[in-house]
Amino acid sequence: MTKKLVVFGLGQRGNIYALFAKTYPEKFSLVAIIENDPDRIEYAKTTYPGARLFADYRDFLKENIDADIVAVATQDADHREHAIAMMQAGYDLLLEKPIANNKEDCLAIYEASKQYDKKVVVCHVLRYTPFYSTVKRYIDSGKLGEVITIHASENVGYYHQAHSFVRGPWHNKAQSSPMILAKCCHDMDILRYLMGEECLSVNSYGGLYYFNKEHAPEGATQYCSDCPHKDCIYKAQKLYTSDVSRGFSSYFTTKDLTDENILTDLKGSPYDKCVFMNDNDVVDHEVTVMQFANGKTACHTMTAFSREIYRDLKVHGTKAELVGVIEDSAFEVRYFGGEVEKVRIDVSEANVGGHCGGDYFMMNSLYKALNGEPAEGITYLDVSIESHLMSFAAEESRLNNGKTERIEK
Ligand SMILES: NC(=O)c1ccc[n+]([C@@H]2O[C@H](COP(=O)([O-])OP(=O)(O)OC[C@H]3O[C@@H](n4cnc5c(N)ncnc54)[C@H](O)[C@@H]3O)[C@@H](O)[C@H]2O)c1
């Protein structure tokens, strides 16, 4: 049965959910969009003409529109207000991660979901990827024996770090979230999910080493458009017209992504700023060590310093180790004293969104869950909050030079 969807915040993420509904009208019908940016409102009018449009969510609430789910995809700092207002009005939520950018707001959303008896699915998209769901099935089958320790890395990519965490929405902790939450709450969630044990404590180390004034080349200027260092690998004009970062240009232009449109709208924008002379303060490297129940452990490394964006994973069981990279859509299971099994994963079905199929399969799981069918990966706030508590504890630990932080629920 078709489910009625409302998208609150038609930005990068909200647009994926709207697009999914447009592509699969038999699954979701996009009944309304709440968006307050004039350019995005124009985009909504032309792209989703069937949806009712509201610039202010209070006007939306006055209309009592019938909907099965509201996708809250505004920025981190607004989640508390927006999520609670929607739940209070009676809507279940698909809530973008992070739940909120501080512990108090996360817990307020959690309490509100209990108070209003509303379901909240947090967009931990990695859970739904064919890669991690296949890994989880291997673990649950017992093929690896008992999982004792996991090592995972999140290689953010030098150009992605520059875009999102030096120039973009998540560059400043006070205005958005710490990296371990903004980027790595996915990884905390996956580690908890794969380990199948409660995380008891964390230690974390890291900082902002490179993207600061000390590393600015001699004579660099505040904006790349004026800078004499034409060969700088972070030169905005070069990055945003390259294959790897062109798509990110939609953060500063709603026009077609031609070189000419990009270069015009980039000039003087926050994305034209020198990566060494900004007010960014989020880390560019961080290592987090986790202790789980029964003495099991995990280690997670986040680094800005990689040529490509990729996540790698090593799961060490008592009978075998599993080694893979999600972006390769493949992993190996190395059985002790036995063969090496090579597993290939097919993600060709995923034709909307990104995250190695995570966005697409999450929307499919959501559709099934809303219809009362078994839905792989689907979890609600009571589970998602654990990864956030791990992230908050890790940030506290990092700020205290790796002091052990216990996870308190
Ligand atoms: N699940 C994931 O893997 C993933 C990936 C990236 C971002 N995110 C999260 O998704 C959320 C959105 O990120 P994004 O990259 O789409 O950001 P974005 O800035 O592109 O989108 C936010 C949209 O909300 C609109 N908006 C803001 N305040 C509003 C209001 N009061 N009323 C109506 N509209 C309003 C903005 O105009 C914008 O269009 C963030 O919380 C972010 O951390 C999740």
Image (cartoon, helix red, strand yellow):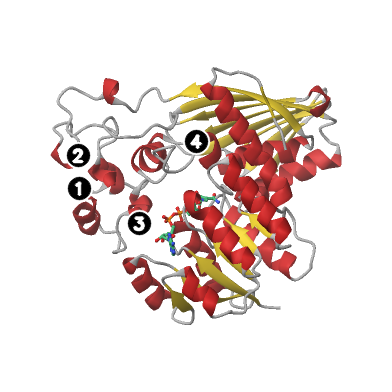
The x and y percentages for residue 295 are 80, 22
Mark 4 or mark 1: name the one nearer the start of the chain. Answer: 4
The residue wearing badge 3 is 250
Mark 2 or mark 1: name the one nearer the start of the chain. Answer: 2
Give the vertical position of 28 relative to 282 (above or below): below
Q: Are marks 3 and 4 in contact (CB under 8 Å)?
A: no
Q: Residue, x 46% and y 53% (percent of image)? A: 75
- CA separation, marks 2 and 1? 7 Å
Q: Residue, x 59% and y 72% (percent of image)? A: 5
Q: Quadrant of residue 232?
A: top left
Q: Are marks 2 and 3 in contact (CB under 8 Å)?
A: no
**Residue 152 left/right relative to 182:** right
Query: Element under label 4?
Result: helix
- Identify which amino acid the numbered label 1 is placed on: Gly
Query: Element under label 1?
Result: loop
- CA separation, marks 4 and 1? 26 Å
- CA separation, marks 3 and 4? 22 Å
Image quarter where the C terminus lies is top right
**Residue 185 left/right relative to 168:** right
The residue wearing badge 1 is 268
Query: Element under label 3?
Result: helix
- Identify which amino acid the numbered label 2 is placed on: Tyr
- Identify which amino acid the numbered label 4 is placed on: Met
Q: Quadrant of residue 397?
A: top right
Depth check: give the residue in front, 175 or 204: 175
Q: Are marks 2 and 1 in contact (CB under 8 Å)?
A: yes
Depth check: give the residue in front, 385 or 164: 385
The residue wearing badge 2 is 223
Asked if disc 3 is less than 8 Å from ligand 1, the answer is yes
> Dot 3: within a 10 Å radius of its alpha carbon, few (fewer than 14), some, or many (20 or more) residues?
some
The residue wearing badge 4 is 179
Mark 1 or mark 3: name the one nearer the start of the chain. Answer: 3
